[in-house]
Image (cartoon, grey):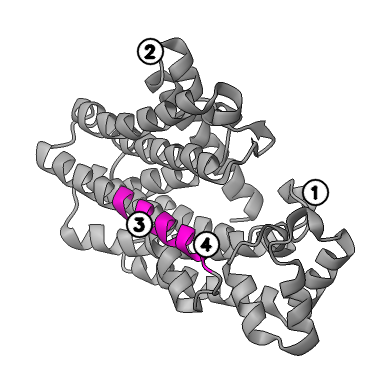
């Protein structure tokens, strides 16, 4: 399957998920629900819901059974985006004003809270409506609450990295993104398994492993895009994460791989924000590229991708399994 094919499939399922999400976010006060759906209405790949659905289908389930859980993980994802933007004081996200910028801080906080609480409502109420047994719903709630806890722990760890004058070790960083980013991918696949009419504990474990590894690979590539990504594709200036002083995986590798003048040039612009000239940022990006960090990050992401694919290789061939495999390849091969 080509990249264009997996993109087309993602778009097809995204449309179904979006309709369900927007129906779920109707209520009063109207402005609160408008704020909660603000980022959802801007679109997106809906990769996490896609993984819920395909995990369910691989075990013999249907889109109908998977949809409540698929929507739930997307609500949690948007909850994290709303609150992340508040913490970072960001004004724009994907070309759209952030929720707190558009609706004000108090309503944005409540919008995030609504997204969080609604995710559990979808699993319990809507899950029951599509025939998911009570015992599986209980397990789904436990899995999602655990993931939400890990996301918060990961975010707090990342905040600690940012406020420290020291750089974290590479493994410390991996441990952080395993919680902050990969936990939601992991639970997406676990909820997909639990949505299927027939599953065993081993299925949940295998698909959780798939999701966790894909989540780490996703963040590593995302970090790479933040350093050497094409501004025409990312919508951000080249070397944005260097300018903003984000202690991400490729930057940690670059600092470990350089010394002397080259390392000093990276550190000179790291976190300098508006004080750093475009030429100095470009020079730092060039140094990072010259020492092979691009390929190192891609290779590390592929290791996690391969571990993900191994986790589901024991299942029979099916369209759903192939979609999961191709989505893994898509995550790692995203354009810079």
What residue is disc 3 on? 153
Q: Earlier in the sequence, mark 2 or mark 4?
A: 2
- Quarter of the image with the N terminus is bottom right
Q: Earlier in the sequence, mark 4 or mark 3?
A: 3
What residue is disc 4 on? 163
What residue is disc 2 on? 27
Asked if residue 236 lies left or right of residue 135, the reply is right
Q: CA distance from mark 4 to mark 3?
A: 15 Å
- Classed neighbour count for the residue bearing mark 3: other residues with Cα under 10 Å, few (<14), some (14–19), many (≥20): some
Question: Eyeballing the image, is 27 above or below 178?
Answer: above
Q: Residue at x 72, y 60 (%)?
A: 243
Q: Secondary structure at mark 3?
A: helix
Q: Nearer the viewer, residue 8 or 308?
A: 308
Q: Residue at x 52, y 67 (%)?
A: 164
Q: CA distance from mark 2 to mark 3?
A: 31 Å
Q: Position of residue 161 (x, y in %)?
A: 50, 65
Q: Earlier in the sequence, mark 3 or mark 1?
A: 3
Q: Which residues are magenta?
A: 148-164
What residue is disc 1 on? 232
Q: Earlier in the sequence, mark 2 or mark 3?
A: 2
Labels 1, 2: front one: 2
């Amino acid at each position: 399957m080509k990249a264009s094919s997996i993109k087309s499939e993602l778009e097809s399922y995204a449309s179904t998920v979006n309709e369900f999400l927007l129906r779920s976010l109707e209520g009063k006060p109207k402005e609160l629900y408008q704020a909660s759906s603000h980022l959802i209405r801007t679109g997106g790949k809906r990769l996490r819901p896609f993984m819920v659905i395909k995990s369910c289908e691989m075990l013999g389930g249907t889109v109908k059974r998977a949809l409540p859980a698929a929507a739930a993980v997307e609500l949690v994802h948007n909850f994290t985006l709303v609150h992340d933007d508040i913490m970072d004081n960001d004004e724009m996200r994907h070309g759209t004003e952030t929720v707190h910028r558009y609706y004000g801080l108090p309503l944005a906080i409540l919008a995030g809270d609504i997204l969080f609480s609604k995710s559990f409502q979808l699993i319990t109420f809507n899950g029951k409506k599509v025939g998911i047994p009570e015992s599986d719903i209980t397990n789904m709630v436990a899995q999602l609450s655990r993931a939400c806890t890990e996301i918060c722990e990961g975010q707090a760890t990342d905040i600690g990295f940012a406020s420290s004058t020291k750089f974290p070790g590479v493994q410390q960083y991996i441990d952080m993104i395993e919680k902050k980013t990969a936990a939601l991918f992991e639970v997406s696949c676990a909820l997909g398994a639990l949505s299927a009419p027939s599953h065993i504990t081993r299925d949940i474990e295998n698909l959780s492993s798939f999701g966790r590894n894909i989540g780490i690979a996703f963040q590593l590539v995302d970090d790479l895009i933040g350093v050497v990504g094409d501004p025409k594709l990312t919508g951000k200036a080249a070397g944005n994460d260097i300018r903003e002083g984000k202690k991400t995986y490729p930057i940690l590798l670059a600092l470990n791989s350089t010394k002397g003048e080259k390392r000093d040039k990276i550190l000179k612009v790291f976190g300098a924000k508006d004080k750093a000239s475009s030429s100095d940022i470009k020079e730092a990006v060039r140094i990072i590229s010259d020492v092979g960090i691009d390929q190192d990050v891609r290779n590390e992401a592929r290791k996690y991708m391969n571990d993900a694919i191994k986790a589901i290789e024991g299942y029979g061939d099916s369209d759903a399994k192939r979609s999961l495999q191709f989505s893994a390849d898509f995550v790692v091969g995203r354009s810079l």
